[in-house]
Amino acid sequence: MKVALVGVGQAGGKVTEAIAAFDDRMEFGAVRGALAVNSAEADLQSLSLDTVLIGQDRVKGHGVGGDNELGAEVMQSDVDQVMGSLDGRITAEAEAIFVVAGLGGGTGSGGAPVLARELSRVYSVPVYALGILPGRDEGSLYQANAGRSLMTLAREADATLLIDNDAWHDAGESVEGAFDAINQEIARRVGLLLASGEATEGVGESVVDSSEVINTLREGGIAALGYASAAASDDSADNINTVTSTARKALFTGTSLPDANTADAALLVVAGKPEAIPRKGVERARRLVEDETGSLQVRGGDFPLESDQLAALVLLGGVERSDRIDAFMERAKQAQKAENEPDRDPAEQFQNDELDGLF
Ligand code: GDP
């Protein structure tokens, strides 16, 4: 799937840079354009991407702190400038646009939904968000910001692929210290997903196509992406269990959103040497994804890749009914109350008011 990426805010820029670098290193050519947008000048300077500084008149290049309402405002004020910079980058060949942002901060949290709305208005290709949820140990401002941003993004983007910052860091390790490793995990998953529809070698009926990614995300809502790999034998008959066990791992331990396994739709991509991919294994793995997600729409396809490994990539669409999203939204609601009324009786804070959208 040929895409343009727009990173908003610090995390958005770094993750966009990591995905573009992975695509480049692997020579996939799926990322056709990438841009980083921020209100903090210093965060843009460290990136090897084209950049746009927004909100200069309001915050003078110093960022919006954790204020995502201000993040939304400065994006709105300067959205024409951002759209102008994207003009040449979103060419006719782009099949989708991804807006990438950390949802717990200010510029990305507030700016990404505004930009997604504007992009959807102007372009006919799907506009997806790649959103990063704060880890559990990050403060209540991050949780509240992410809740409001997610609600608004889910409305404005065609689908929102979520990454939980707690998904891949080891117990005891700080989230900050793990950012680079997490960003590499995101880049590998998203980079492979985008490239999987671009395969040109060994093209056969079983090879996955970009439209299958788009169809899996068609119902909208929240999506998750799992990945796992294992050493493969050259003889496909020996790899049947390898395919089913990597699919299981991708779904349960390698996922970007732990505990989000109930899905409306799914896509299982098996990557590896075409002669090493067992049809029987792929069929079984597909049934496993069907059983475990409860989805009746499980698509599947191969991604021919010169590698000694077999990998399973599982894209889940429509996971918003899962326990993980419930738990997160509940935490965000409590956090919003705590931020608004820090001195209130904690017992009262358990009343179930809805979170407010950003706009
Ligand atoms: P902004 O620049 O105002 O949009 O704020 P940030 O992008 O720094 O957003 C803060 C949120 O993003 C927090 O939840 C951080 O945990 C997360 N974050 C910041 N940098 C990174 C990063 O490089 N990788 C990942 N995965 N998360 C990050």
Image: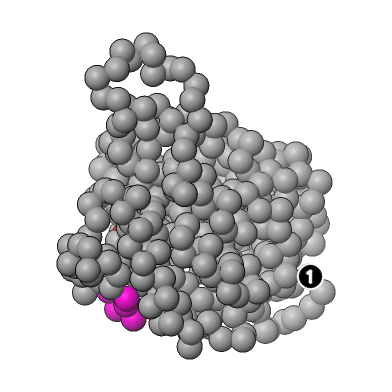
Snapshot quadrant of residue 22: bottom left
Q: Position of residue 185 (x, y in %)?
A: 43, 58
Q: Position of residue 348 (x, y in %)?
A: 39, 14
Say what amino acid the circle numbered 1 marks.
Ser
Q: Position of residue 279 (x, y in %)?
A: 79, 62
Q: Is residue 246 visible?
A: no
Q: Position of residue 123 (x, y in %)?
A: 60, 75
What residue did someone put label 1 on? Answer: 206
Asked whether, in this view, residue 349 is left or right of residue 227, the answer is left
Q: Is residue 334 above or below residue 147?
A: above
Q: Is residue 304 magenta?
A: no
The local secondary structure at tag 1 comes to loop
Start and end of the magenta stretch?
47-52
- Between residues 277 and 107, which one lies in front from this camera angle? 107
Q: Is residue 301 visible?
A: yes
Snapshot quadrant of residue 80: bottom left
- Between residues 345 and 136, which one lies in front from this camera angle? 345
Mark 1 lies within 8 Å of ligand 1 (Cβ measured): no
Q: Residue at x 79, y 51 (%)?
A: 297
Asked whether, in this view, residue 195 is left or right of residue 203, the answer is left
